[in-house]
Amino acid sequence: MMTPEKTFAPIRTAVMLSAGDGERLRAVANGRPKCLMELLGVTLLERNLHALKEAGIRTVLLVVGYQGHAIEEKVEQLDLDGLTIRCLRNPYWRSENGLSLMQAREAVSDQQRFLLLMSDHLFDPGTLRDFLSRVPDDDRSHLLVDLSPGEGVDEDDATYVRLSAHNRVSAIGKGLDQAQGVDCGAFVLTQDIFPALERSFAAGDSTLTAANRRLIQQRSLAGIPLRTGFWQDIDTPTDYQSAKKKLLATLPNSGDGLVSRHINRKLSRPLSVWLARTRATPNQVTLASFFLGLVGAALFALGHPLGAGLTVQLSSILDGTDGELARLKLRTSPWGGFLDALLDRYADGLILLAMGYYAYTLSPGWLPI
């Protein structure tokens, strides 16, 4: 008689470790926990919670320690519909990250598998979504591995991964020889991680890496290569600048024309970065762009083509800024997209009519029409 194949429920719970004090980032974080430092107008915590929600996670267990009350207050202010966030206190937050994960043991005891993230890592929403979609239904834990780490990876501090046949992890650690990739800081773990942590604690090592080595000995840790999106470990001011650069690289629109790609984006991107630090909303920028379009149309109709052309070009630059700002501040919405498209069409139509009228005043006849 054949044994029925074991099935696994979708991964809907995530643990995020946010207990450390981020000593090397104090110049950027201004004494706050790392997850509360702002990255282009939005805290790292909010960016990761948004990424988790986009990846299908419904419950987040946030392990806090250093200034845990500040993180808890921030969580209470957030309005992430469909995402339940629960904070767990780690009284040993000055110790290694394995002790932080152990604080979530009881909270995830009813989960076959759960996602684990480090809160000082920035993840593109598409990266986590793709990672979870490729985790196979088996009894192993899985680690996201960057096989082509480029700019932004600290070679002296990165945790390297060596893979064997079928992407099984055969070794993990800092300064690892013959490594194939870098640990991205995202795991799908089974309940086996907790006995592995206990054995590591007993041996005097309370790091997550030590527990992962126990899983490797059991042949129960596999790697999943990074395939899309980006990630960034943020431990130093240099890492922080790399994270900003990677976020900004996501702003260009694949549908941009030549003018937008080579002129408008070079101006709209710095403007979006500046606006991200203000209270300006994407819809306000959309309305400002529409208003400038109307001014440009009026200038054409009144016979001032140079001023009209410059005003219409500025309107076009702002028209790119609203979408960039929405993505930077995590405020994209169907309504915002509809409003932008609707007002764009009205502005375009009025500008063309005004241009036609101006041309007709110069040379009455059918050609301008």
Image (spheres, rainbow, N blue to C red):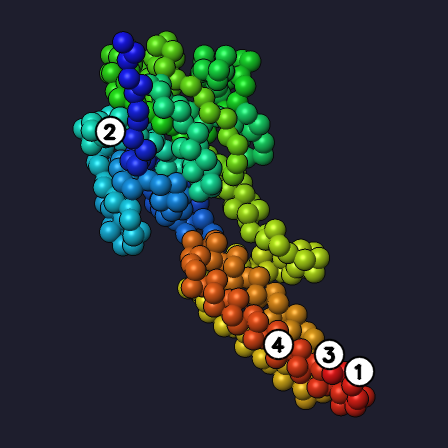
Marks 4,3: beta carbons within 8 A: no
Asked if disc 2 and disc 4 are in contact, CB closer than 8 Å, the reply is: no
Please tell me whether mark 3 sits on a helix, a strand or a loop: helix
Dot 2 falls on a residue whose secondary structure is: loop
Q: Distance between the residues labelled 2 and 3?
A: 65 Å
At which x and y percent is residue 280?
44, 65
| Screen quadrant of the C terminus | bottom right
Q: Residues within 10 Å of mark 2 (few under 14, many from 20)?
A: some
Q: Name the residue under label 4.
A: 349
Residue, disc 2: 111
Q: Name the residue under label 1.
A: 367
- Check whether the beta carbons of the residues at disc 2 and disc 3 lie within 8 A of each other: no
Percent x, y for residue 54?
39, 44
- Nearer to us of marks 1 and 3 is 1
State the CA–CA distance, disc 2 to disc 1: 72 Å
Q: Distance between the residues labelled 1 and 3?
A: 21 Å
